[in-house]
Amino acid sequence: MTYLNMIKQFITREKFIKIAILTAKVLFVIAIFTVIPVGTAKNKIFDTRIALDKNQPFPLTIHDKKTVITSGIAKADMDRLNQNPNPEIIKSFIQSTATDYGVDWKLVYAIGYHESGNYNSSLARSNNNYFGRKAGAGGYASWSTPEEGIRNQCEYIRDHYYSQGLTTPAAINPIYAEDGSWCIAVQSVMNTL
């Protein structure tokens, strides 16, 4: 065998090895994609804002999508509120709830802060009555959870005061509390929020 033939064979073997390695790599990649799913995108139906209408002058139209943002309190926070209410959790709950009733959360919070001594009075702890509300039959009102008491207060403020245009502590004072300085105390709490 001549030297030239040996070089040709070597080059041929080298090309063969390169082709074999390349083929092995390609087969390996194909094997990976057949064994491991590429994703679940092919199983999902995607909603598009683009519509095709061949009868219109501009056949492609893009429809607006609405994004709805709702406020609220997480279930874990709600559970904490009902199991171990503290002023910060109560404040967060009032902030997220008062808007559902169309009332100022600062007013609701300030009334509760003033009436219950920073949400810590015995009436607050035993009756979930943070707002000093009296019961119709005498005595003080009671709710089974802090959530119920707060929601009821928001509804009460809306129905008995806001509906009559009474939206400030000064306007509410003559009806809500016997003490004429009640509105000053509630307003001062509101001013800190």
Image (cartoon, grey):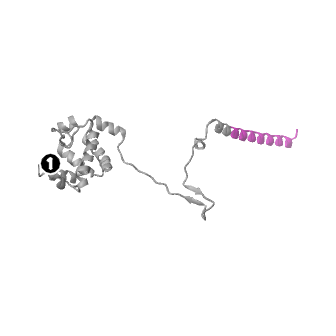
Q: Is residue 94 above or below residue 143?
A: below
Towards the viewer: 127 or 164? 164
Q: Is residue 76 magenta?
A: no
In the rendered image, the residue lying farthest to the front is: 137
The image quadrant that residue 33 belongs to is: top right
Q: Nearer the viewer, residue 147 or 95?
A: 147
Residue for badge 1: 177
The image shows residue 103 at horizontal and vertical percentages of 28, 51
Going 25% across and 51% down the picture, which residue do you hit?
106
Name the element at disc 1.
Answer: loop
Q: How many marks?
A: 1
* Most common SS among magenta residues: helix
Q: Is residue 104 left or right of residue 117?
A: right
- Above or below — where is 180 with respect to 19? below
Residue 184 left/right relative to 100: left
* Magenta-drawn segment: 1-27
Amino acid carrying mark 1 in the image:
Ala
Q: Is residue 26 magenta?
A: yes
The image position of residue 150, as x and y in percent, is 26, 43
Closer to us: 35 or 10: 35
Q: Nearer the viewer, residue 20 or 138?
A: 138
Task: Judge left or right: residue 94 versus residue 2.
Answer: left
- Left or right: where does residue 26 sit relative to residue 53? right
**On the rendered image, what quadrant is the N terminus found in?**
top right
Q: Residue at x 55, y 52 (%)?
A: 48
**Image quadrant in which you'd find residue 58:** bottom right
Give the residue furthest to the bottom.
Answer: 57
Q: How crowded is the residue under tag 1: few (<14 C-alpha within 10 Å), some, or many (20+)? A: few
Furthest toward the right, the residue is 1
Which residue is found at the position 36% from the left and 48% from the top?
71
Which residue is pictured at 25% across the width and 54% down the height?
163
